[in-house]
Image (cartoon, rainbow, N blue to C red):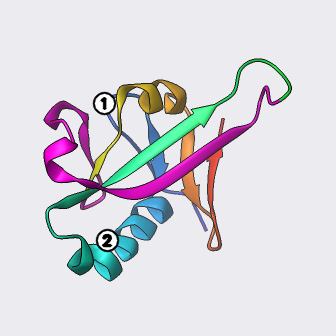
């Protein structure tokens, strides 16, 4: 099975499996989150005891607080990704492996 990849103009790379994961999450939860958009956050530690470790989070955000310039479409789903997270995700791959989301270099 081949891995189908996509790239946002910001440099973020995502797999079709990740886009499908987002679409399923959006379909399941959007009724309870009217007026909100999905917000993807990512943090990678570059110094100290936690250097090299990273964390990602996907949550719902009030649509009024999600700046238009930080809204991106992954598959068919609009997602807010703020500048700091985009910098950390640039040239990295977001992928859903069937059980969890992974961020790969």
Q: Position of residue 4 (x, y in %)?
A: 48, 56
Label 2: element kind? helix
What residue is shown with label 1? 9
* Above/below status of 48 relative to 8: above
Query: Total of numbered circles in the picture?
Result: 2
| Position of residue 47 in the picture relative to residue 12 (left or right) | right
Q: Is residue 105 magenta?
A: no
| Position of residue 62 in the picture relative to residue 13 (left or right) | left
Residue at left offset 71%, top offset 20%: 46
Q: Residue 26: which numbered mark, if any? A: 2
Residue at left offset 24%, top offset 61%: 76
Q: Residue 75: which numbered mark, if any? A: none
Name the foreground residue: 19 vs 26.
26
Hey, which residue is sitting farthest right in the picture? 49
Q: Position of residue 51 (x, y in %)?
A: 79, 25
Hey, which residue is sitting farthest top in the picture? 47
Q: Count neighbours of disc 2 (C-alpha within 10 A) and say few if under 14, some if 14 to 19, many if 20 or more.
A: some
Q: Position of residue 72 (x, y in %)?
A: 26, 43
Q: Is residue 69 magenta?
A: yes
* Residue 82 picture quarter: top left
Residue at left offset 86%, top offset 26%: 49
* Above/below status of 16 relative to 8: below
Residue at left offset 47%, top offset 48%: 14
Choose the circle earlier in sequence order: 2 or 1.
1
């Amino acid at each position: 099975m081949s891995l189908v990849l996509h790239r946002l103009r910001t440099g973020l790379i995502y797999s079709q499996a990740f886009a499908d994961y987002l679409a399923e999450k959006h379909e399941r939860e959007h009724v309870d989150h009217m007026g909100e958009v999905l917000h993807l956050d990512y943090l990678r530690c570059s110094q100290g005891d936690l250097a090299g470790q990273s964390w990602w989070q996907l949550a719902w955000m009030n649509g009024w607080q999600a700046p238009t310039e930080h809204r991106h479409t992954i598959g068919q789903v609009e997602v807010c990704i703020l500048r700091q997270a985009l910098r950390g995700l640039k040239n990295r791959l977001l992928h859903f492996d069937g059980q969890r989301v992974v961020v790969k270099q």
